[in-house]
Amino acid sequence: MKLYMSVDMEGITGLVDYTHVDSSAHNYERSRQIMTDEANYVINTAFEQGCKEVIVNDSHSKMNNLLVEKLHPETQLINGGVKPFSMVEGLDNSFTGAIFVGYHARASMKGVMSHSMIFGVRNFYINDIPVGELGFNAYVAGYYGVPVLMVAGDDQAAKEAEELIPNVTTAVVKKTITRSAVKTLTPTKAGQLLKEKTEIALKNRAIVKPLIPPEAPLLRIEFANYGQAEWAHLMPGTEIEANSTIVRYQAKNILEAYQAMLVMTELAMQTDFC
């Protein structure tokens, strides 16, 4: 078995607000230690269950959060901020399965720190199907024929995963009270849960099918304000839907749609919020 892991931060045990996930804030350093420990629970179990190779992609913010010196020594880490495929960089058809750790719900859902790539996005749509980071990443995995075997994060991320991916294993490490408050397990208890769920996910891998993306998908991104839509529309091939903040792009395949999303969200962040 060869396993791919994408590790985000907002869905990690005990993390509730920006002070935990912003590198300039006071809770960040302890949070990245918890994040690294959480990744290791999954990695260690994967090797114990017979995985021969585990590739981990740091998928939060500047994507340099995981403490490489504290990861399982056989792990290979992809990190750094400018990646052609961001949260799914390095994923291809050589993998047996993928596991998403530390994931959160999409912007339009209730969930701790819920969002979709940037806080200016209200919704992503693939052929009118609403998706967040989780769904978009699962579609890229599906393009390569790779099933998403497990999603770990808050209860709303688990709900989103279960609605998209039949038979996926979910590990709920915290339950949403509000967007910035949770009822959480301790890291020790979360570690036990992650070990158990990883073992189940790998044993059940044959019954999880890849989330196959549509051919030539239409990508639609709904932004929070018109200025963001205008910036996103600077990308050639896009158009703004009438009387809306939705920018659309007709892609050749899900990989092109994914990179278009990355470019448009990056452009949208240039907006002046005065």
Image (cartoon, helix red, strand yellow):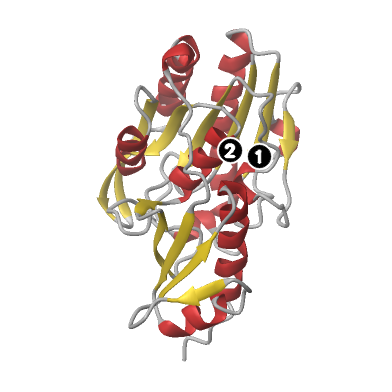
Residue 190, by quadrant, is top left
Q: Nearer the viewer, residue 205 or 36?
A: 205
Residues at circles 2 and 1 in contact by the CB criterion of under 8 Å: yes
Query: Residue 154 at x, y = what percent?
Result: 36, 40
Answer left or right for 74 relative to 257. Answer: right
**Mark 2: which secondary structure?**
strand
Residue 34, by quadrant, is top right
Q: Residue furthest left?
A: 177
* Residue located at (62% from left, 29% from top): 4
Question: Which sits earlier in the primary sequence, circle 2 or circle 1?
Answer: 2
Q: Nearer the viewer, residue 157 or 183?
A: 157
Query: Residue 211 at x, y = what percent?
Result: 45, 33
* Residue located at (35% from left, 53% from top): 130
Residue at mark 2 = 6
* Residue located at (44% from left, 63% from top): 220
Answer left or right for 215 relative to 50. Answer: left
Residue at mark 1 = 57
